[in-house]
Every structure is written in C-alpha cells, then in structure tokens.
Amino acid sequence: MADSSLPSPKYTIWQAINACLSLSARAIEEVRALAARPPVPGRPGKDGLSAEDFDIEYDGQRTFTFKLERGDVKKQWKFVIPFLLDAGVYREGQAYEKGDTVTFGGSMFVAQEDTSDKPETSKAWRLGAKKGRDGKDGHVRGPQGPVKLGS
C-alpha cells in the first residue's frame, strides 16, 4: 500500500538523473568561463579567488565533490546523485550504500539504507525482481525448441 503522506514524485528517476548531470556539466562550463577571467579581488590585503582555487572530483559512481581551496581555507561539498547502481553479486561482509542493487539467490535486491546485511534476512534490502521458476521438468522452451536446464 502506498504511503499517502508522501508527495508524488514530480519527475521520473531518469529525468532527475538527467537534470543532475546537466547541472554538473553546466557547473563545469561556468568554472571554465571563470578561468578565462581575471581573479576576483579580495578584501584589502587579501588575494581574491580564481578558477584555480576550484575543483570537482567524480568518484566514478554517484558522488561529485566540489572543492574550494585557497591557502589554509578549504571548503568542500558532496553531491550524491540518487540512482540505482549495479553492485553485482552479493558478497558477504561487503558494505553496500543506499541505492546499490545486488543479485542474491537468483533475485535482485535494492539497498534501502547503507548496510552489510544479507538480502532476504534484513529490512535494509527490498526485493526488486524475484527469481523466476524453471520450466516443467527442467525444460525451458527457447527459440530453437526445448532446452534442458541443469545436469
């Protein structure tokens, strides 16, 4: 049953991901444009900021880290794009983040929170796709006819 107290999503997950990537690309364009300008003057007796003081790191998964560094002053902000990420087959003891998907026992599970618990035994996982059953007598009808499953 759906929770009626939650607002309806305004966008699909793919629209949200596309918007995040577009904003990230726009931020990079702005930084490049700023790099072409002279530094912004600082307070009297202080240097201003330039594009050389700004950096963006991408972890190759879901997180962008925006960094601003000038001398001893360092600021950073993390931006995590909320989408499902295929983490492969579940491995016991491995830490998984909210939004990771794993296969376990032929089914796919989605992490609802950061966890290292085993799917099917923890509320931290939600079943995303249940394993299907084999065909009658272990045979599945394929495009070329019946195929024997197992040994």
Image (cartoon, rainbow, N blue to C red):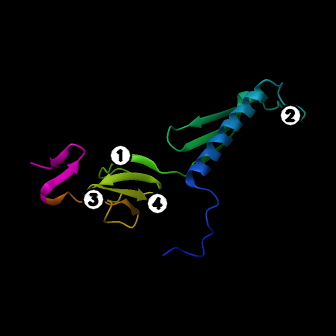
The CA span between labels 4 and 3 is 26 Å
- Mark toward the start of the polypeptide (4 vs 1): 1
Which residue is rendered at x = 40% and y = 52% of the image? 101
Residue on which the image places disc 2: 42
Residue on which the image places disc 4: 113
The CA span between labels 3 and 1 is 19 Å
Q: Residue 88 carries which label?
A: 1
Front tag of 4 and 1: 1
Residue at the farthest right position: 44
Disc 4 marks a residue whose amino acid type is Glu
Q: Give the range drawn in magenta.
A: 137-151
- Mark toward the start of the polypeptide (3 vs 1): 1
Front tag of 3 and 1: 3
Residue on which the image places disc 3: 132
Which residue is rendered at x = 26% and y = 56% of the image? 105
Disc 1 marks a residue whose amino acid type is Gly
Viewer-proximal residue among 114 and 33 = 33
